[in-house]
Amino acid sequence: MALSGEDIRYAPMSLVHHNTRDIACLIYESAPILFRLLFGSQAITCLAALVARSHNRFSHQYIRVAETDQRVVGIVVLVPATRLAEDADYRDVLKFGQQLWLKLVQYLIVNHILQHSYPATAFYIGNLAVAAEYRNQGIGRRLLSHCIADAAANDTTDAIFISVDISNVRAQRLYESLGFQVVTTRTIQLFRGAIGTRVLSRSIPDLPREYEHHN
């Protein structure tokens, strides 16, 4: 359990101060089944390499962290919609066989359950995760609030989007409590049942004043 008086700070990720593998482990925890499907047993190693680079949706430049003096205890990835499709780093990180497998999985499954096209004036929250022993303390809510504030600070942004696994009712309730509303549901039927995601959005012009100068 986290100490009740433990100081938790929120800041952009830094390659100088934060360990890419620690960040990758938390990103992995946000969607372990999906990442195992995409990258196999090398998922965390691949994610760590992508975090260290600048031309992919898991890049360090899009990550905010929640941290104590000892470790990073939470992460959120906030990506401009215009940068979601960037994939130049995959050629450097993945072997040829891995690249072929990734394309196959994306074509057969991922493209059916994840929405990839968003308005150019939007931001997308790609991943949110909090270390197990630090959950239920408002850290995820605080990270999301930072994302909303960052989006609101951009004069050209009019909306922020997020997707959630259809089975993760608790996460959806959190997003809805912050003003997000479901806009679409995407599912695919597999031999073990249906899997899919719900996409939620939040209008930036209608944000309450509390987000305008969030620290």
Image: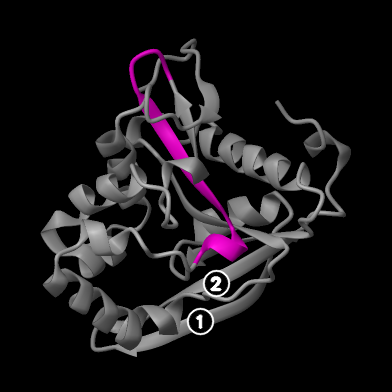
Q: Circles 2 and 1: CB distance less than 8 Å?
A: yes
189 lies above or below 206: below
Q: Secondary structure at mark 2?
A: strand
Residue nearest the observer in this picture, 81 or 35: 81
Question: Magenta part of the protein: which range?
Answer: 68-84
Label disc, if present, on residue 186 of the rendered structure: 1
Residue 160 rendering spot, x and y as whole percentages: 68, 58
3 lies above or below 37: above
Quarter of the image with the N terminus is: top left
Q: Is residue 154 left or right of residue 50?
A: right
Q: Residue at x 69, y 51 (%)?
A: 177
Label disc, if present, on residue 213 of the rendered structure: none
Residue highlighted by disc 2: 198
Residue 116 rendering spot, x and y as whole percentages: 52, 74
Quarter of the image with the C terminus is: top right
Sooner in the amino-acid sequence: mark 2 or mark 1 = 1
Question: What's the distance in space between the residues labelled 2 and 1, CA to CA?
Answer: 6 Å
Q: Residue at x 14, y 65 (%)?
A: 95
Residue 77 covered by magenta stretch: yes
